[in-house]
Amino acid sequence: MYAQPIAEAKAPVRLAQNRIRPPVLAFFRLISPLYMKATLGFSRVRLLNAERLVRAYADFFQGKTRLLVAFRHPYGDEAQLMAYVIGKLLAREAKARGIELAQKPHAHFVHGYEVPLWAGAFERWLLPRVGALPVYHAKFDSPSVRRIRGLMKDGRYPIALAPEGQVSYSSEEPPRLESGASRICLWCAEDLKREGRNEAVVLLPISIHQRWPKATEKALDALILGMEGDCGLARVAGESRFERLQRLGEAVLAAAEQQYRHFYGAELPETPGLSSAQRLSGLRQAALTTAERCFHLKPEGDEIRRVYRIRQTGWDRIFRADMADSEQMPALKRSLADRLAGEAWYASRHMELVDLAYYLDLDRLKPEDPLELYIETAQNYYDLISRLMGGNISQRKALRPKEGIVIVGKPLPVDRTLKALGLQVKPSKAATEALNRVLLAEFLTCIEEIRQARLG
C-alpha cells in the first residue's frame, strides 16, 4: 500500500504483455553488481552449497527436469538478491566447476499483483520485460495461474518464488508457508504425466540470511536512540542494548493498545499477567477487526488470509475497475470515488500493522544473541513504529553495509519425495501439505547450518 495518504481514486493498472526482452535483461545483468552495492547496500554475497544450484540449472537446461526455486523472504530484498545470484553468480560458479550451462541463467519470478501498484511506473514497465509473473493472494485469477502453469511445464527458464507469500521478517524462525510452490510443482507433474513426458519436477529450497560488520553497532545504537525519541523514552544510565530494546518493545505495545482500546473500541484486557505474545495477538485481532469493519468484511481464514482480503479490498477501492474512462465520470461520482479511496488508504493502515506484527515475537531476542539478531529485531521494531505512524514496508530501515548469505538446500524431486512418504504424485491436499512439510524441514536444516557456522 502507498506510504503517503491517497486523495484520489485511480484507473486500473494494466501490465504489459509478459515477454522477456533480451536487451533489458542484458542491461540489468550488467548493472546488477552496482545495484546490489549502491542501492541495496550489499558489500558482498556468499553462495553456500553453490554446486546444488549449478547442477539444478544444468539439469534443467539439459531437459532432464522442470525446476522451481523456492527462496526464503525474511528481509524484503530477496527477489533482487536472487536475481543477482541466478543472473550473475551462478554462471561464475558453473565455470569454476567446469560445468557448461546451455544458456545464460534466469528465472521467471512470481510476485504479488500489488507490487507494481505501490512500487511505481518503472517497476510496472520492468517486471513484464524480465518475465516476472503477477499473482493474486486473495482471489483466484485463471489467466495468471495458466501462465505460471504453462511456464513451469514448458518455459525456457525455471520459476522462482517465495513460498511464504510475502515478507516474513525473521530469518531464523520457522516460516509460514503458502501452498503455492508445492501446488505448482504438483500441477507440473500432472501435466507432464498427461503428455507422456519423463522430466523430473524438482523443488529447490534456498534460505537467505544477512550479516553485518561489528562497526554497524554504532548505526544500531543510533537507530535505537531514534526510536526512543519517537516513543518519548528517556535514556537510562547503564542500560544495556538488550534492555533498551525490551523497553522499546513494551512502549510500542502499550501505545498501540491504548490507541485501539480508547479510539477503536477494542476490548483489550489490561491484565498485567499477560505475556507479550498474548498482548500482541490481542492487538492484531483488534487491528484486523477495525479494518474489516471499515470494509464491511467478515473475518474468514487465518490472520494472513484476512490480511490478504483487506489488502485486496483496499486496492480495489483505490484502483477502480469502473474508472477506465474517468474523464467522463460526473463530478459527484468522481468525488465519492476519491473519498472512498482515501478512506481505503486509512483503513489499510490497520492491515499494514498486522502484516508485520503477525511475524513478530517480542520475547525472541536474548541478551547473548549475536549482532545480526539484534539488528533484525531493531529493524522490526522500527518498522512496527513506522506502521503505527502510517508507514509501510517501503519505509523499512536497512542498516548498511551488509553481507548476503544464500544457502542452497537439498533439491527435492517431487516424485521421489512423495513416494517415499507413501503418497501419490497428484495435486491433492494431502500431497501439497506433505510436500510443504518437507520443504519446511529443509529450510530448518539451512537455518541450523547458518547457526552452526556462526558458532564455529
Image (cartoon, rainbow, N blue to C red):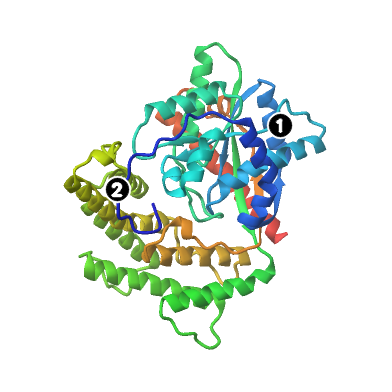
Q: Residue furthest bottom?
A: 237
- Judging depth in this view, the residue of 17 and 436 nearest the camera is 17
Q: Position of residue 113 (x, y in %)?
A: 42, 40
Label 1: state its secondary structure.
Answer: helix
Outermost residue toward the top in this view: 196
Task: Pinpoint residue 61: horizontal percent, then vertical percent.
Answer: 68, 24
User: What residue lies at 30% left-to-right and 51% top-to-bottom?
Assistant: 8
Image coordinates for residue 106, horizontal then vertical, percent:
63, 34
Q: Which residue is mark 2?
A: 9
Residue 55 tag number? 1
Q: Quadrant of the C terminus?
A: bottom right
Image height of 317 relative to 226, above or below? above
* The quarter of the displayed image where residue 198 is located: top right
- Residue type, mark 2 in image: Ala
Q: Crowdedness of circle 2 by 10 Å Cα count: few (<14), some, many (20+)?
A: many
- Relative height, residue 429 to residue 222 (above, below): above
Dot 2 lies on which element? loop
Residue 204, position as x, y percentages in the image: 60, 36
Which residue is located at x 59 percent, y 67 percent? 369
Q: Is residue 35 left or right of residue 303?
A: right
Which is more foreground, mark 1 or mark 2?
2
Residue 164 visible from this viewpoint: no
